[in-house]
């Protein structure tokens, strides 16, 4: 009687197979884990870049139309502030010191509203925020700013059938004498400031707070509107090069975002389009 030899795996072959499968499994696990790490890092980096681009573009659009020389920075509180332009105009004649007047004729972009401030030859940011001194009937001090007394309507040329737009009379809250003439006979109007401050790792935008603040800090600005603009910020740096008669103002923005050991730095320059 003949017996057939049975085919199968020996114990050694099974052990070798298990070891090989284990090595392959560990290798695949390492590859998958590495791929997941790369994906997570890439996703985190893209999210940080999107945040950075959003906040820098938003700030760029606002700062470029600021009143010349109105940008201020407080490095200790990580805040930057400026005055958005609400209107611009060219004037016919200026009550230049020692002369004074309660009105002036201007050709604006659009109408003025009550309590708007106008400034001619802005050179100092602090001066733009100060309260307007009450009128001294004995002596009128020369200034660069005045306050609009009442709403002033204006219809641009394109909305009329006349050959040219008519200049309007701009009334002031009090008799005013200006310090210096603008080479372009130009004035800027503004109402309230806008500021951005870093608090911890979050960047906030402040608006609609009073001009008369004592310090550029979140504590002083919190009486206005406060909106979260960006998170996961490690550090910020704001630098300002003020405008002159022959040079535009320049604001340098630097943000460093950090999340999951990923760090992204963004540098952005904003050219302020207006000069005094």
Image (cartoon, helix red, strand yellow):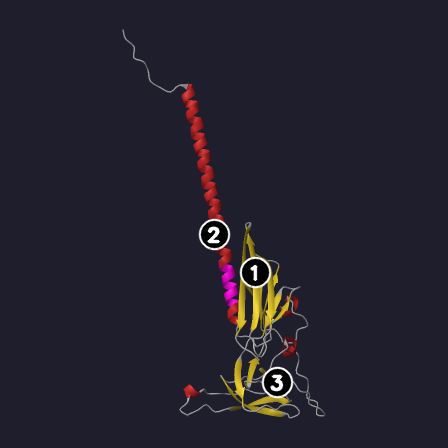
Q: Categorize mark 1 by other alpha carbons within 10 Å: few (<14), some (14-19), many (20+).
A: some
The residue pinned by badge 3 equals: 146
Q: Secondary structure at mark 3?
A: strand
| Image coords of residue 173 (percent x, y) | 62, 88
Q: Earlier in the sequence, mark 1 or mark 3?
A: 3
Circle 1 SS class: strand
Badges 2 and 1: C-beta atoms under 8 Å apart?
no
- Which image quadrant: the N terminus? top left
Mark 2 or 1 closer to N-term? 2
- The answer to which of 185 and 117 lies nearer the viewer is 185
Lower sequence index among marks 2 and 3: 2
Dot 2 falls on a residue whose secondary structure is helix
- Dot 2, crowdedness within 10 Å: few (<14), some or many (≥20)? few
Name the residue carrying label 2. Answer: 43
Query: Where residue 276 appears, x then y in whole percent?
Result: 57, 80
Residue receiving disc 1: 255
Closer mark to the observer between disc 1 and disc 3: 1
């Amino acid at each position: 009687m003949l017996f057939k030899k049975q085919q199968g795996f020996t114990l050694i072959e099974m052990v070798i197979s298990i070891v090989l499968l284990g090595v392959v499994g560990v290798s695949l696990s390492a590859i998958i884990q590495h791929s997941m790490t790369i994906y997570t890092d890439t996703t985190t980096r893209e999210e940080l870049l999107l945040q950075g681009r959003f906040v820098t573009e938003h700030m760029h659009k606002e700062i470029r139309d600021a009143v010349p020389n109105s940008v201020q920075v407080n490095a200790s509180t990580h805040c930057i502030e400026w005055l958005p332009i609400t209107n611009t105009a060219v004037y016919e004649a200026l009550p230049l010191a020692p002369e004074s007047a309660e009105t002036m004729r201007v050709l604006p972009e659009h109408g003025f509203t009550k309590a708007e401030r106008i400034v001619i030859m802005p050179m100092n940011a602090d001066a733009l925020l100060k309260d307007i001194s009450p009128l001294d009937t004995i002596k009128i001090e020369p200034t660069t700013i005045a306050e609009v007394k009442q709403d002033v309507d204006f219809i641009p040329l394109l909305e009329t059938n006349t050959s040219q737009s008519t200049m309007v009379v701009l009334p002031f809250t009090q008799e005013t004498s200006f310090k210096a003439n603008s080479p372009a006979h130009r004035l800027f109007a503004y109402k309230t400031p806008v500021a951005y401050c870093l608090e911890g790792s979050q960047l906030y935008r402040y608006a609609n707070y009073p001009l008369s603040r004592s310090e550029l800090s979140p504590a002083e600005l919190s009486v206005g509107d406060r909106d979260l603009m960006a998170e996961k910020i490690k550090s910020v740096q704001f630098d300002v090069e003020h405008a002159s008669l022959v040079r535009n103002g320049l604001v340098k923005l630097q943000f460093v975002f950090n999340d999951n050991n990923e760090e992204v730095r963004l540098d952005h320059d904003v050219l302020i389009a207006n000069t005094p």
